[in-house]
Image: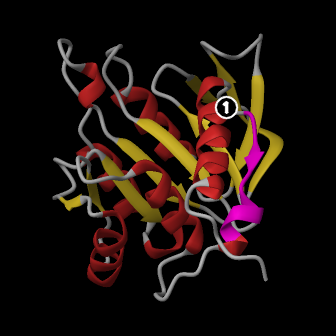
Amino acid sequence: MEKFDYIHDIQNSYRKLLDSMAKPGSINNIKEEIDKLEVHSELPKELMLLADVLLNLESSFYIKELEFQHYIKLHTFAKVEKLEEAEFIFVDRKNYSEEEFIDLLEKVRIGTLQDPHLGGTLIVKVEKITEDKILSLKGPGIKDKKYLGIVGLSREFIEKREEINSEFPMGVDMIFVDNSGNLVCIPRTTEVEVSI
């Protein structure tokens, strides 16, 4: 198997992530990069790749599993922070009940009117991302409307997200990756409705 290239593969993944953030609801794929990455931990490779892309010595992150905290810190040199203070929050959706997932979202920092860029970014590994007409997205970077299906996102979660992001420019940016390496972003500026 081809070895992971920490310059080329991270740049590739970063470009795809930027494209997904600029075009909310558009699905990119990072499976090729994920497959090459070696992770000597139970930490999902999808989350580790995004940690490698997003984190550095200057950044802070939260992940609830202690073993995963140590692994990410060791490989990125980023600072482990409590949920309410972290810039980046990594979540494996299957390790959270619906109640815990919504509770976590309520605790992510949203920035201030003076410093909206201090809002947190939630990075969530989900089972599956599709173009099914379950979520309807509109806003900057979207021509007319975009449709999306994300397994593990309930109507209650979306409603809570809309409530949290209602005081523009404050809010939480979201990045989702699934088992097939599909990657999609829902920035704080995107309005999301449940279509079904």
Q: Residues within 10 Å of mark 1 (few under 14, many from 20)?
A: some
Q: Position of residue 134 (x, y in %)?
A: 75, 40
Which region of the structure is painted magenta? 26-34
Work out whether residue 133 can be spotted: yes
Q: What residue would you read off at disc 1? A: 19
**Residue 114 on the magenta span:** no
- At a point 26% along the width and 48% down the height, the residue shown is 59
Q: Position of residue 46 (x, y in %)?
A: 59, 66
Question: Which is nearer the eye, 133 or 29?
Answer: 29
Question: Is residue 32 highlighted in magenta?
Answer: yes
Residue at point 77%, 64% (across, down)? 32
Front in this rendered view, residue 168 or 15: 15
Q: Position of residue 132 (x, y in %)?
A: 83, 43
Horizontally, is 60 left or right of 154 in the view?
A: left
Q: Quadrant of the C terminus?
A: top right
Indicate whether 155 appears above or below 104.
Answer: above
In this view, the residue farthest toward the right is 132
Whether residue 15 is situated above or below residue 50 in the rendered picture: above
Is residue 153 in view from this perspective?
no
Left or right placement of residue 4 versus residue 2 in this view: left
Quarter residue 181 falls in? bottom right
| Image quadrant where residue 104 sits | bottom left
Q: Is residue 102 left or right of residue 83?
A: right
The mark tally for this picture is 1
In-image side of 61 versus 97 (left or right): left
Instruction: Classify mark 1: helix, strand or loop.
Output: helix
Q: Amino acid at mark 1?
A: Asp
At horizontal 30% and vertical 54% (from top left) the residue drawn is 103
Q: Position of residue 184 (x, y in %)?
A: 66, 43
Q: Quadrant of the N terminus?
A: bottom right
